[in-house]
Image: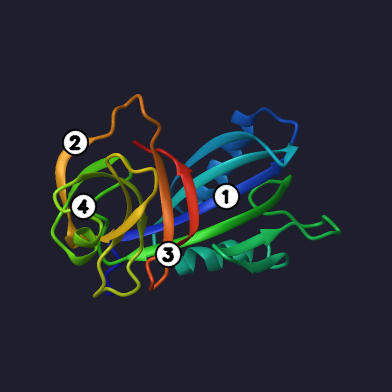
Amino acid sequence: MTSLPGYRRAFLRIMVRAASPTGEVGQQLGRALAVFGAVDVSSLGRYYKDEALLEFRATLEPAGRVGDCIAALRALAPEGWRDSPVGPAWVRPGHGRVSLLHPELEWVTVSPAEAAVPPRFVPGDLVRILDCPAARDDGLVGEEAEIRGSSTPATDADPWGYAVRPSGWDTLICFDEPDLAPTGRRVSEAEPVEHRVISVQPDGTVTGSYVTPSQA
């Protein structure tokens, strides 16, 4: 029997055009997604570009492979799927005769993430930057930084990557997991913490940022 990767997630951004209370819609989405695995659904309220839409984030840990989960989602409503910069996306067809997860769902994007092992750090963790070329270039050896996002390894041989904000910085910089050491501390509970999934280009550029509310 083939073992499953230790880290399996599908991050969904969901827009629902509904007059129903937000809590009721979120519960309906949670029940629809729970058939695929453990799920956490959070409401972000009205979508700022269209206040007729309710915006939700969902983090799904499939019982099986992420690819199989996405294939099962596609099978629920084969018409309306397309590619997007963050992964597969479903948009309600113009004729409106099909639906996905909720009768009034307008569109959803699915960002897959799968790795052999879970990340050592999560957003909000405080870490120490170790001696490495990137740290030496910016004078950051030994400095403390906050984990702001993670980049899934491209292969099982690659490490997790992280976007961190060094103390006193307003911008993010990327380091691999071996270049960071835990401090055992996290940011103050009074500070907002995001779960951010990022894409990092070979030149270190951060792209494809996707944010979910803190699960801490």
Residue corresponding to mark 4: 140
In this view, 55 is above or below 99 = above
Residue corresponding to mark 3: 205
At 43% from the left and 63% from the top, the residue drawn is 199
Distance between the Cα atoms at labels 4 and 1? 35 Å
Which mark is first along the chain, 2 or 3? 2
Q: Answer yes or no: do the residues labelled 1 and 3 have beta carbons within 8 Å? A: no
At 53% from the left and 49% from the top, the residue drawn is 33
Taking the image as shown, residue 14 lies to the left or right of residue 64, namely right
In this view, 8 is above or below 104 = below
Name the amino acid, label 4: Leu
In this view, 2 is above or below 61 = below
Residue corresponding to mark 1: 13
Q: Position of residue 22 (x, y in %)?
A: 63, 30
Q: Nearer the viewer, mark 4 or mark 1?
A: 4
Few, some or many residues within 10 Å of mark 2 (<14, 14–19, 20+): few
Distance between the Cα atoms at labels 3 and 2? 27 Å
Q: Nearer the viewer, residue 136 or 149?
A: 136
Few, some or many residues within 10 Å of mark 3 (<14, 14–19, 20+): few
Name the amino acid, label 3: Thr
Q: Check residue 185 in the rendering and tell me which mark sits there, or answer none.
A: 2
Q: Residue furthest right?
A: 95
- For label 3, the SS is loop
